Image (spheres, coloured by chain):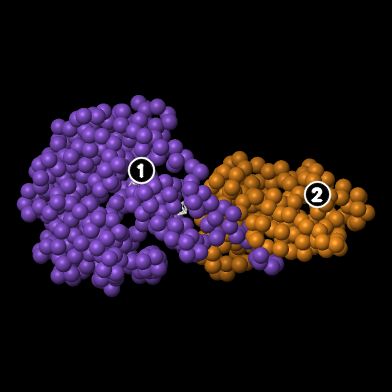
Chain colours: A purple, B orange
Amino acid sequence: MTDPADTCDGLDEPAASAPAPDMPPDVPALKVFYLYLTAGCNLHCRHCWITPTFVQGKPVPAECLDLGRLKGAVAEGKPMGLSAAKLTGGEPMLHPQFREIADYLSSEGLELSLETNGTLLDRDLAVHLVRHTTLKRVAVSLDSPEEQEHDRFRGRPGAFREAVRGIRFLAEAGLPPQIIMSVYRGNLDRIEGLIELAMKLGASSVKFNPVTHSGRGEEIHRQGLGLDFDGHLALIRRIRGPLQDRYPIHLGAMVPPAMSTVKELLRYGGEGAGCHVRHILGILGTGEMALCGIGRSIPELCFGRLGQDRLREVWMTHPVLVRMREELKGPFPGVCGDCLHAGRCMTHCLAQNYEACGTLVAPSPLCAEAVRRGVFPATRRRQGTGGRGQGAGGNRL
Amino acid sequence: MTASPDPLSPVSCLLTFRLRNDVAIEDFGGRSLVLLAGALELREINAAARRLAGLLDGKRTVADIAAETGMPVGPVAAALLEMEQQGVVRRVVNWSKERREPMSEARYLADPDVSFRTEGDDGGLLYNAETDTLEVINPVAVEIWKHLSAPHTRAEVAAHLAEVCEGAAPEQVERDVAEFLDGMVQKGFIGVVEEPA
Ligand code: SF4
Ligand code: SF4
């Protein structure tokens, strides 16, 4: 995995707001588990936000989610509204019981999604997952159409070939995956090539995530290779404008809505606009419960441990969660308090906000920077320019 | 854009107006400046318009104001309709935002308190501060929205659109207009005007 919201279902899948039958009305339903099945990874990506343990073969057992504890959590979570799980990591397929876990969650009727580097997928597993489990979405990371570049970025020779093979297996089995490209200045000129490769491989979509400052990504920024504010916005405009016009495959990017043009808002609707973290709980390989997954790198966002703490109690009473829910009711701080999109956006990705400024409910880094630079669009402010737009003349104040 | 109804029609006598919430008037000696806060614009209005604005309370009809000022009804109605177009005053209408069966004679009006923002030619944003709801609309919808600064029937809107969107198939235009109006009435951005008896 590369970044908190790389393939975040929290942004892409609006969760219904109705409370679960067995929950007090003021506590949101717990709908999705983000399962960080293992902290280990068989690659050594230059930008990974999690900085997982590099594992040549086997992951550290203490960092592999215990199936017994997971079963307990599912049993507790279902009456609270649990209906889906995302399998992620590290590399989730390194978990020695990966297949068993996927089968178990499917037998419990949970809808599954998976994010993986794709290297450990063989044909048999792809067919099994697609035909015999409830897996609905897969995201595979690919950072360049050039083998050596991808391998260099991912820190291991052979990573490209294995990922491409995995993507093919999934597409052949009937579940074309999304491809995630981590973008930095070193691969900006590979974007078109990657889109073309994705189409050739039968992928369903391509999502572009600028490498952030978190985890190993900081090193990329230290080297001056990260995208700055202007570079980030230029990337978004290019992907959602001319490139989406040119290529029939769906191209996505995670953007706070105030930073989207009207044309993009019309084209992409609410996609990637608002975070549903209120309905998500991260469970780390160690059994710790955390805010989506960010608790892996920020211990104060861990809420307790499966087997020791009751899931229901943690969900209902942990002060971080309770405070976050209160703050998400608004009014929102800073520019968000004056933003037309706040009701839906709810300050965008809380994990990224926390990494940027140590506060969950805060203007997203991109919007905050736009304000600092004086380029936050006045038309997106509640008090902004606009009026009736009748094209009437008059002196601007 | 033509305002409706005709200032000289009998219906105009019964219209009532009030200043928009986001408007302030400052008088300097013999001159009056109007601040349109929503659009960040300043306008100057003449003495007659200033006098009319001072009488707007949302209750007096055009006929009442004409009688009070001794001005003919036609010019009073025309001046107020023009100020409406400029975003200075809003019409007080009894309107319903309830979903109802399409009626060919029903007249639709954009909620004057909804803030409309354009960004280039790509479309616009409608923001209803009362309900904190936002709607992103495409350029055709922008055209309809602007047209509905005064009440119009579906047929009138469709005719207007057919005029500005050359080459569009009339049936398609009618379908699009109906779909847009129904959706926006349901969302509370557009109302159906209940005409004065
Ligand atoms: S200003 Fe805040 S509410 Fe508005 S788009 Fe940005 S993060 Fe979202
Ligand atoms: S805060 Fe929301 S958008 Fe960000 S990673 Fe967590 S669930 Fe996803």
Image check: A338 left or right of A223?
A: right
Q: Secondary structure at mark 2?
A: loop
Please provide percent x and percent y for residue A61.
10, 42
- Residue that mark 2 sits on: B56
Residue at 71% in and 59% down = B35
Front residue (pair A362, B8): A362
Dot label at residue A277 = 1
Please provide percent x and percent y for residue A320.
36, 38
Above or below, comparing residue B190 to residue B165 in the picture: above
Q: Mark 2 packing: few (<14 Cα in 10 Å), some, or many (20+)?
A: some
- Disc 1 within 8 angstroms of ligand 2 (CB): yes
Residue at 84% in and 54% down = B52
| Most distant residue in the right direction | B70
Mark 2 or 1, closer to the camera: 1
Residue at 51% in and 49% down = A337
Parent chain of label 2: B
Please provide percent x and percent y for residue B190.
61, 49
Residue type, mark 1 in image: Val
Please provide percent x and percent y for residue A114.
22, 48
Quadrant that contains the C terminus of chain B: top right
Image check: A314 left or right of A16?
A: left
Mark-to-mark CA distance, 2 and 1: 49 Å
Can residue B183 be seen in the rendering of this structure?
Answer: no
User: Do badges 2 and 1 share one subunit?
Assistant: no
Residue type, mark 2 in image: Leu
Front residue (pair A68, B133): A68
Can residue A124 be seen in the rendering of this structure?
Answer: yes
